[in-house]
Image (spheres, helix red, strand yellow):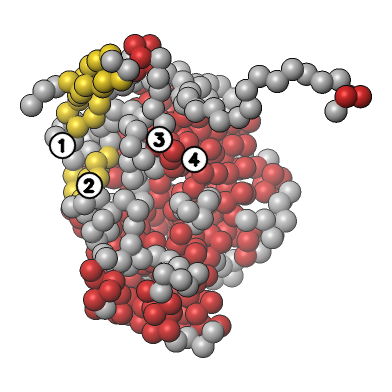
Amino acid sequence: MSDKAILEYDGKRYEFPVIKDTENELAIDIKSLRSSTGMITIDPGFKNTGSCESEITFLDGEKGMLRYRGYAIEELAEKADFLEVAYLLIFGELPNKEQLETFHEDIKAESQVDEEMKKILDGFPKSAHPMGVLSSLTSALIAFNPTSVNISSEKDMYHAIVKILGKFPVLVAWTMRKKKGLPLDYGDDNLGYVENLHKMMFKKPSKEYKSNKIVIDALDKLLILHADHEQNCSTSAVRITGSSHAGLFVSLSAGISALWGPLHGGANQAVIEMLEAIKEDGGDTHKYMDKAKDKNDEFRLMGFGHRVYKNFDPRARIIKKAADEVLEDLGIVDPILDIAKSLEKVALEDEYFVERNLYPNVDFYSGIIYRALGIPREMFTVMFAMGRLPGWIAQWREMRLRHEPIGRPRQVYIGKTYRPFKPLEER
């Protein structure tokens, strides 16, 4: 097989290198396309364009495969905790016991947020969407940490990473407590990373905090499953923002804003909104499954199928079990969750959905778990951001250490050609 791709146009022949990645997928290197041919490519949404070379995450949508740094997502979700996975994504290897303990201690040492941040939080009304609040608070961290990260210093890079990993869970918890009208709470250094997040979010002022292992395990798995997903919209936003040498915190804020969109991180919120709409219409799930099959019906089934995974979403297999365990342990009676289980049953058995691989995806089950835990639906995307944090950090770090050029896509101009200017009185 040739290691060159041939382009023939207007009687001329051009050759471009073909690159094979470590999973034997092929890419055409077109860095010299414009300089050698005068042409560019057009690829709306960058569906066929590789923006970078990366060692972090591999996914194969046809095979339903997701790996972080070579480790299968199924093994990581079963055998590792979120902090181990964060370390793996950011630094490239799973930590040993001493490295993990040091990592956690360093994160805890950076978990205090400046008291003046509360004034910024107070400036938001309770009606403000939590994602807007979180994005603003994350960006505001730069005001309290104005020194740019020296990427040539491993020590400086590490310090910036543990700082945001320490402070981000506090911002997430404060964002929810603001929404629910609860007093702000700081963490407990005696708890694990995910358990501490849960405590900061849910501890009532007059009650002792009690941990639930099934709940914490489910939350841990959810965060792991969302930790990275290759060059998606928000990750690309982080990398392209950082490519201008913008700092880590502001680049993360750009990722949060991109994640906010309903076509990206807002999907699990859309699942609950769909379920509530079905309930308001009488709760007939078979009626809505029939509507989903009707191409002329405007109804769209949220949380089923996936744009990347053409088979079953591997993350959904993992989190379905956790969702079942949480619902059983908490013994929640909720008609919305009953509707969800009914939709799930039909989708897994109905020939129409099975043939088209329209299985419940990770957004479907994560929305169910978050609702069962008492997390407001506006907070679902915030929880997604909490999980995606180490992936964004890893992608930003990789991009800066590889000294990637500033992102600057081209365009195909379809506007007016030159027009002479007309004075105001002649228009």
- Residue 10 in the image: above or below residue 107: above
Q: Identify the residue under disc 3.
A: 43
Q: Is residue 399 left or right of residue 359?
A: right
Residue pictured at 51% horizontal, 88% vertical: 282
Mark 2 or mark 3: whose residue is earlier in sequence:
3
Residue pictured at 68% horizontal, 40% vertical: 116
Report the amino acid beneath label 1: Glu
What is the residue that sits farthest to the right in this orientation? 425
Residue 371 in sight: no
Image quadrant holding the C terminus, namely: top right
Report the amino acid beneath label 3: Asp
Q: Marks 4/1: CA distance?
A: 27 Å
Judged by depth in the image, the label closer to the viewer, 2 or 3, is 3
Coordinates of residue 334 in the picture (x, y in percent): 46, 83
- Quarter-of-image position of residue 198: bottom left
Image quadrant holding the N terminus, namely: top left
Q: Identify the residue under disc 4.
A: 255
Report the amino acid beneath label 2: Asp
Q: Identify the residue under disc 1.
A: 23
- Quarter-of-image position of residue 204: bottom right
Circle 4 sits in a helix, a strand or a loop, which is it?
Answer: helix
Q: Is residue 379 left or right of residue 424?
A: left
Residue pictured at 54% horizontal, 39% vertical: 253
Q: Marks 1/3: CA distance?
A: 24 Å
The answer to whether mark 2 and mark 1 are in CB contact below 8 A is yes
